[in-house]
Image (cartoon, rainbow, N blue to C red):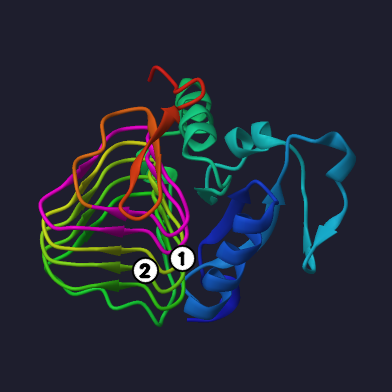
Amino acid sequence: MTAQALQPLLLVGAGGFARETAQAVLAAGRYRLIGFTDDNPARHGTEVDGLPVIGGTDVVGGMPDVAVILCPGSGAIRAKLAARLAAGGIGPDRFATVVHPSVHLPPSCTLGHGSVLLAGVTLTTSVTVGNHVSVMPNTVLTHDDVVADFATICGSVSLAGRVHVGAGAYLGQGALVRENLTVGAWSTLGMGAVVLTDVPEAEVWVGNPARFLRQAANPPSL
């Protein structure tokens, strides 16, 4: 299939994660990347890594043949954007999934719409990844893990088997989670956290072993 025949893809957001996603899109070769949107008018008409910023999020509604990925690094912001687009009639069928060609993704695993798996991610078997999930490089998700919608899993995170990551949770760089545990919705694990017990919803845990630090700031009520 020629590049021109590929479905066009637009990345909503033009920050660091959007730029990383763009590189995964180009490496995979499944879509024709046409550029970014950004809600900062000062960026409209500029370029990011050689790709145009064509306007704000509202342009998506006028481009019915274009697939979309939500690219803010924050799961809460991705959730708000998804709700905003849904209110404008943009349904799940409009969202692409992006998987870097180096990702190990067996047939027993499932990946929801709008999710992105960057280079070197490994899913071992029977892993379920929800919608609009961001998984950064070299993460390992092992058997029967479940990652709910809008979660963000930073680079080099490792989850043992049967871990459940709640909606919108943020797992910082290099975090480790023992088997059969739950990381609650909208909770945050600090960089290098070693999680040996369940983490409740909307809490921040840090350290080795990981311990409660504080309540999450303004978790969304979605």
Residue drawn at x 55%, y 51% as measured from the top left: 66
Q: CA distance from mark 1 to mark 2?
A: 6 Å
- In the image, taking residue 128 as reference, residue 13 lies left or right, namely right
Residue 118 rendering spot, x and y as whole percentages:
46, 69
Disc on the earlier residue, 1 or 2: 2
The residue lying toward the viewer, choosing from 55 and 13, is: 13
Residue 177 rendering spot, x and y as whole percentages:
25, 56
Q: Residue furthest top?
A: 221
As drawn, the label of residue 155 is 1
The residue lying toward the viewer, choosing from 47 and 91, is: 47
Residue 41 rendering spot, x and y as whole percentages:
85, 35
Identify residue for label 2: 139
Q: Label 2 near label 1: C-beta < 8 Å?
A: yes
- In the image, taking residue 21 as reference, residue 187 lies left or right, namely left
Residue 133 located within the stretch drawn in magenta: no
Q: Is residue 196 above or below residue 188?
A: below
Residue drawn at x 18%, y 73% as measured from the top left: 124
Residue 184 located within the stretch drawn in magenta: yes
Label 1 element class: loop
- Which quadrant of the figure contains the C terminus? top left
Label 2 element class: loop
Q: Is residue 177 above or below residue 90?
A: below
Residue range (magenta): 169-195
Around disc 2, counting alpha carbons within 10 Å, would you say few (fewer than 14), some (14 to 19), or many (20 or more)?
many
Q: Amino acid at mark 2?
A: Thr
Q: Amino acid at mark 1?
A: Gly
Residue drawn at x 40%, y 17% as measured from the top left: 221
As drawn, the label of residue 32 is none
In this figure, what is the number of numbered marks? 2
The chief SS type of the magenta part is: loop
- In the image, taking residue 150 as reference, residue 197 lies left or right, namely left
